Amino acid sequence: MLTYLTRHLQVLFATLGDMRRTPMATINTLLIIAITLLLPCLLYIAVKSAQGLSQNWQGRPQISIFLQANVSDNTAQLIFEEIQLHPAIELAEFISPDQALEEFRILSGDEKNSLDQEIEFLGENPLPPSIVVMPVIESSASAKLQALKDELSSFDGIDTIRLDLDWTERFNAILQAFTRVALLLSALLGIGLILIVGNTIKLLIFNRRHEIEITKLVGGTDTFVRRPFLYYGTLFGILGSLITLGLLLLASELVAQPLQELASLYQTNALLHAVTGWELLTIVLCGGVIGWLAARWSVAQHLRKIQPR
Amino acid sequence: MIKLSHVTKRYPNGHEALKDISFDLDAGEMAFLSGHSGAGKSTLFKLITRIEKPTSGQIIVDNQNLGRLSRAKIPALRREIGVIFQDHKLLMDRSVFDNVALPLIVIGMPHDEIKKRVRAALGKVGLSGKEKQLPITLSGGEQQRVGIARAVINRPNILLADEPTGNLDEALSDEIIDIFADFNQVGVTVLIATHDLRQVERLSKRTIHLANGEIVEPAESIEDTEQVASDLELS
């Protein structure tokens, strides 16, 4: 076991030494790998961030309940109390016609005159009393919201109920399509990466053809001969993905400031998905596995053909 | 130790390098393989080390039938045989130490043990203190001796040497052949391919003569060699 480990360590350090002896070629390969890996990582972060946004909104869906315009204040109050006590509802706010008008005035930025004129023309405030409801988290899934809406519709004195769901659903559909495209793109880049690393390993194999022949002549097994190339592939993958992490850090530094401003405008925090340590580790592991796979593939194709002459 | 029965080797291009060769080399025996270039000496070595497969016939090396040897067992066979090549087959970008150590590295020997053995082997071939040099900085004779050190480092049972004195002067040739005789003294089976008849006569060991891929009687072969030599001079 110990000799096995020492043998692997020897190959590891020998391979690192070989890489250092050809710095330009190594750096080229590593940068190609790093940049190819960077794109799937960015796509992942984009999808994750968008999912985070969508969850934020879904956590606070709203139901607007418009009462019939002719209900008395008393009835409206009764309906409001009944809704407030409903177990699926966390918060409810009653908006009287006067409040609604005031809000409308503020939102439309109106300077009193034109709106007042119109109301004067109508003779009365046309806005109905309404109740804005926020369901408890457990009832926030869209199917449950729909059920809640149906239940509330049966109350007397309620005119219409509107779920603020349509646009989150639309957003989710877009997000899903985007996720699919991102996955497909990442898979393609992964295959591309295997081809790139595989080709680099192939060149290395042919550069060391003489050495491989002699090693086989003195009794080196196939396992022994291929080991350095597997290390090459795996190290390429791991080192390349470490550079990817560096680039990710750089990218997040660059977009942090503008995103912070955007977030503060919308009164949310952390628009960007914060990458966890596990995710960083996964990126490096993926890099290593891709490199190893590429080396395995390349070695299987080319090493057997090289025999002593 | 090495037994060939009715071995024929025909290359894909139709050239018949060996025709119905049979001979038997006992364990601990030392023999020369003589013959003009192209007589089939190198092909014979390639068959014994399983670099090539015979077209027909049977080869048994160290009680293993090479015709039935699986791919996976070839490395073990080659570890039993130390081979010295006419063109040395050294790694020119690796130090003398790394070159000689290679057969020990492939079997995963601990580094300390490798160091000891490499020093001993280099001492035996008279190259002490040249561990760190690159083979390219050595003379032809020194490179040949690096090859010998590599061939014997793993204490093989069989030593095969293909024209080990190729382009060397007489004194150096004697020295190198004497190294092989020393290994033979301690029980190693040695087969040396050479067209250097002086060595054949000097050591008076058994000699297998090859001409045009066939084993021939000594007289005929010498004539044959002389014929080739005179042909070369004429041309």
Image: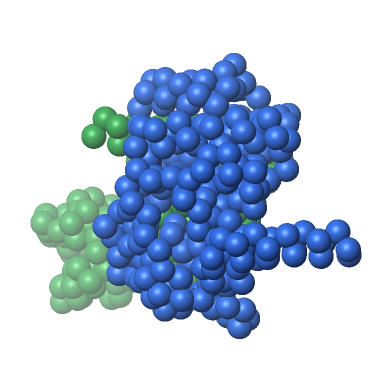
Rendering coords of residue B84 (x, y %): 54, 45
Q: Quadrant of residue A156?
A: bottom left
Give the number of marks.
Answer: 0
Residue in the image at 47% along x and 35% along y: B181
Rendering coords of residue A91 (x, y %): 23, 50
User: Which of A7 and B198 lies nearest the eye of the viewer?
Assistant: B198
Left-right relation of A163 to B101 = left
User: Which of A84 and B170 lies nearest the eye of the viewer?
Assistant: B170
Does the image show residue A147?
yes
Residue in the image at 65% along x and 36% along y: B173
Looking at this view, name the residue that lies furthest to the bottom: B14
Q: How is the image coloured?
A: by chain
Q: Dividing the image into 4 quarters, which one contains the C terminus of chain B? A: bottom right
Looking at this view, name the residue that lies furthest to the top: B129
Rendering coords of residue A253 (x, y %): 59, 35
Chain A drawn colour: green
Give the letter of the blue chain: B
Looking at this view, name the residue that lies furthest to the front: B219
Residue in the image at 54% along x and 68% along y: B216
User: Which of B17 and B122 lies nearest the eye of the viewer?
Assistant: B17
Q: Quadrant of residue B228?
A: bottom right
Rendering coords of residue B125 (x, y %): 55, 26
Residue in the image at 40% along x and 63% along y: B23
Does the image show residue A291?
no
User: Which of A7 and A176 lies nearest the eye of the viewer?
Assistant: A7
Left-right relation of B201 to A5 = right
Left-right relation of A269 to B11 = left
